[in-house]
């Protein structure tokens, strides 16, 4: 009986300690969305957990999102260590209609780290 309890407790500790690629951790990713160094105000930034590659332009395939501020700055404040892919979509009135710019970058996040990752976007 004592052995089963110890095995159960060990399993619970392993499962709790191995949270990766989801919200609620002690690490963060923040940065700026920019098109040729011009900040893209109010861009939407999507994040794909446990991924080094783009999930494409279908935003339903991403796990969470945030909206950038007027200076194009965004932040995902509560992440666990792991691999992520960031994809941003916004508008730049300096490009031909429909003014849409988008792009993405992979990010590798460490335990209790604050990663600055700018997301470049193109037409």
Image: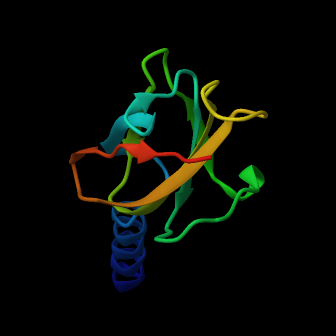
Among the 4 quarters of the image, the one containing residue 38:
top left
Which quadrant of the figure contains the N terminus? bottom left
Q: Residue at x 62, y 41 (%)?
A: 101
Image coords of residue 80 (percent x, y): 37, 53
Compared with 15, 45 (above or below) is above
Specify the farthest residue to the top: 70
Asked which colour scheme the image uses, the reply is: rainbow
Among the 4 quarters of the image, the one containing residue 98:
top right
Q: Residue at x 71, y 35 (%)?
A: 96
| Residue 14 makes an appearance in the image | yes
Image coords of residue 39 (percent x, y): 43, 27
Q: Compare residues 62 and 11 and report the one nearer the observer.
A: 62
Image coords of residue 53 (percent x, y): 52, 71
Task: Count every numbered label the image shows and give the total.
Answer: 0
Q: Compare residues 94 and 89 and report the one nearer the observer.
A: 94
Q: Compare residues 110 and 71 and report the one nearer the observer.
A: 71
Q: Residue at x 35, y 36 (%)?
A: 31
**Left or right position of 98 against 116:** right
Image coords of residue 25 (percent x, y): 37, 46
| Residue 21 makes an appearance in the image | no
Compared with 121, 72 (above or below) is above
Among the 4 quarters of the image, the one containing residue 18:
bottom left
Q: Residue at x 68, y 63 (%)?
A: 56
**Left or right position of 12 against 90:** left
């Amino acid at each position: 009986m004592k052995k089963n309890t110890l095995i159960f407790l060990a399993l619970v500790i392993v499962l709790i300690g191995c949270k990766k690629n989801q919200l609620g951790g002690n690490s963060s990713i923040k940065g700026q969305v920019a098109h040729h160094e011009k900040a893209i105000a109010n861009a939407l930034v999507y994040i794909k957990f446990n991924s080094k590659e783009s999930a494409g332009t279908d935003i339903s395939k991403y796990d969470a999102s945030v909206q950038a501020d007027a200076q194009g700055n965004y932040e995902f404040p509560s992440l666990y260590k792991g691999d992520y892919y960031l994809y941003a979509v916004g508008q730049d009135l300096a490009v031909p209609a429909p003014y849409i710019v988008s792009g993405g970058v992979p990010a590798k996040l460490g335990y209790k780290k604050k990663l600055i990752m700018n997301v470049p976007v193109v037409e």
